[in-house]
Amino acid sequence: MDNIEKLDKVTVKFAGDSGDGVQIMGEQFGNVTAVVGNDFATLPDYPAEIRAPQGTTYGVSSYQIQFAAYDIYTPGDNPDVLVAFNPAALKVNLPTLKPGGIIIANEDEFTEQNLRKAGFESNPLEDGSLNSYRIYRVPITRLTLEALKEEPIGHREKLRCKNFFALGMISWLFSRPLDPIISFLNKRFASKPEILGANIKALKAGYNICDTMEIFPVHYQVPPARLEPGKYRNINGALATAYGLVVASHKSGLPIVYCGYPITPASEVLHILSALKHYGVISIQTEDEIAAITMAIGASYAGALGITGTSGPGLALKIESLNLAVMAEIPLVVFDYQRAGISTGMPTKTEQGDLLFALFGRPSDSHVIILAPCSPSDCFWTAIEAVKLTTKYMTPVLVLSDQFLIHSSEPWKLPELENIPNIEIEFRKNPEGFYPYIRDEKTLARPWVKVGTPGLEHRIGGLEKSHIYGNVSYDPENHDLMTKLRAQKVQRAVQDIPDVQIMGPPDGEILVVGWGSTYGHIKAAVELANSEGMKVSMIHLRHLNPLPKNLGEVLRKFKKVVVPELNLGQLSYVIRARYLVDAIGYNRVTGKPFNVSELLSFIKEEYKGLKTH
Amino acid sequence: MSTLEKQIEEKTYKPSDFKSDQEPRWCPGCEDYAIIKAFQTALAELGIPKEKHAVISGIGCAARLPYYMSTYGFHTIHGRPIPIATGVKIANPELSVWVITGDGDGISIGGNHLIHVMRRNVDINILLFDNKVYGLTKGQYSPTSNKGTVNKSAPFGTIEEPAEPVALALASGATFVARTSAAYVKHLTELIKEAHKHKGTSFIHIYQNCYIYNDGVFDDFTRKEVREERNLILEHGKPLIFGKNRDKGLRFKNGRFEIVEFDPKNPPEDLTVHDETNLSLAFALSKLYWPEYPVPMGIFRRVSQPSFEEMLYTQIEKAKERFQTDIAKLLYSGDIWEVR
């Protein structure tokens, strides 16, 4: 009979050459994990090279997923199970594998040549170096070819089915149903029946072989998590952003014009929106980054909603145009999907390096509203909020998303569309008393006029304008006033920004302050700290400019303020400058999200330091 | 009758109706005054309600023009009026969108956008003021400056070949390309109206004298006394004839033009006939310049092709017919599971 072992939390990592189909395998495993009701979080990781030379360590692509019978916040630090399609995948991922963890290796690929390419002197599957792990050597390539012997497809196509063979094995190992994967394959290969048949056969063969060959001594089962009741789907940050924009368009009645130039990792969102034309989405792939933002500005000027998305290098190119939108005071949403490093850096890795750039990286005193989503599904809500704020305050909103959020996925409790509030848009139509720079008393916003409205013809531009009347002005006092008004207007948005909520004790010893995509990792570390008896509180910022109005007061309630960031201390800098609070940074720039146990150790040290004082 | 047509019928405009309350601040004697006059006259004659016009400029002397118009106007940043105008047209295809640019703004810093707007055929009208110099920054050579031009940034004379805007536009796939001079206000007015009628990107290359930094650079062929001898006025379907006495013509032979002189009463039959749809001919004409050849003026190329925004909206409409458009269903796409 089946030997079933119950687990409450597991991290699995699939790793192979970038052509091995590891990402699709991971995504499908994620979907099945969702269907069986576990909570989960995923971390895809792939090289910048599209097809790096086979068998090399720098060509390794991987997909990590943590799933659990309770709420979890991160894709896990150290995998319990590693599926390695070749020696390079083993080499790269072995250092993070949990001691005593399971390695499932495709032994067919452990040839002398591949071992050499990966930098192994002898075969680790044979030389005893992996004795502290549980190794399962499976000839995945040969078994796949054997299973597909009769299939009417070529040798290469057969080889490409080995990811689904392995997925079949893992599905057996974790007691997963195959049906959701089969229905995915049916959709994906609807027009290629031979490929469809072969993949389904490989999937089933992988599953069945675990029974017949008794590869693994046990199956594992992770019971469903107790998530809040409701309907759920799996969502990553790219999809959530795109859906958020479509909903914002619907709720505001404004057509969206999303303009982008291909750049990693922002292109994902451009791809998704380009396929949503039936929802009225206008998406334009432009000739360069500057055209992307200026077309969006043109669209907003005319009365639609201009949006652009990019990453660091592209944002640098857009800055002069961004300042035009600040000066002209028109709506514009700019998504910066931050990636690692200066210049080209590490385009497929994550970082939070653009906060100070977003805050200060423009000539003169130029301020924009800055938001940062804190999880993949929060990208949905942030997109809607960005549209609301940019149209209400008539000033650009910059959204600091990142590479991790774009690709990482989690279960998302689906909202009811009718429960999402409308975004009220008021176009000025009445010519009486109209001036282009007359301001709303509460928001300081100037009126938004659709080009084409009779009687309201006016001129705007990058030159300084006179207060209220909007004519070109070099008057010294006027410039002083207008500069201050533009800055004040951005600060007025604080009235639409909720206070920060303290998680944990409301005052006392230590407060951990995070922002953006690190929410899950920080929360996991803080919860662990509290479960070990420490008193640690946390707050997480989704609004970076303006900052929530109670932030200073909250910071001062704690003896110590710790700020973990995936940069060299940018929020710490802001907190020190703004509130004169001695923020202590925990700063890592590895291109990866935080390692929860490392962060926990840091918090522990800081906590100990407090106690010894 | 659409509302727009009704408004056109009801309203008649004078050129002065297109003047704003702001006093133009170009240098006295600047030919930009002539261009804005032609522009305002053309708009008045077109009769479209003034709120339907959006005039978008970049940076440079020319780029101040929108402030002096009573239409909607946006004075933007250096080199970028074309993508901004594209955004305006995409957001509201009903608008009549004008780009005011110059040789620095349009050919140098914004050169990339010029290529791509023409390739896309967005229905906007581009007026490129070419004075072959950077005026607003006080006299540096521009990408169209004649080779050997001496000025502040080229005290020993430029060593660069000038860019030819008409040739660039043609090479980029423009569907309407014309040239004239600010000295020919009537011709310019007519071309502006033709440009507006054209569906797709219209490009007018306008020679414009900078009285301060490059005075007289076009005099060799635009002075009244020499105009007819040294310009070639392009007319679709008509032979390429020029000269005060209409006694010279162009013949395309072995891949180049030769100038033929003849008795005007009896022009030779093998003169090249202008054809606005012939790209090779247009391209060859665009390379003609004084003193080797007369300078061609008029419409080099005019062909009908679907505009970018037309195709964009057609694609959206077709997608709406093919796929479901319920946003709630979009959120619920993919595998859904329920937690009870």
Image (tube, coloured by chain):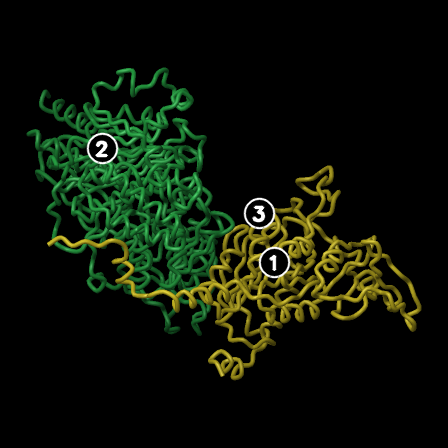
Chain colours: A green, B yellow
Identify which residue is drawn at 59% across, 61% down: B126
State the CA–CA distance, disc 1 to disc 3.
22 Å
Residue carrying label 2: A213
Check residue B109 in the rendering and tell me which mark sits there, or answer none.
Answer: 3
Callout 2: SS = loop
Left or right side of B104 for A35:
left
Left or right side of A176 for A285:
right
Category of crowding for the residue at label 1, using alpha-carbon neighbours closer than 10 angstroms: few (below 14), some (14–19), many (at least 20): some
Give, as a three-letter code, the residue at label 1.
Trp
The outermost residue toward the front is: A150
Residue A522, image x, y percentages? 20, 36
State the CA–CA distance, disc 3 to disc 2.
68 Å
**Is the residue at mark 3 from the same chain as the one at mark 2?**
no
Callout 3–callout 2 Cβ contact below 8 Å: no
- Host chain of mark 2: A
Check residue B26 in the rendering and tell me which mark sits there, or answer none.
Answer: 1
Left or right side of A84 for A173:
left
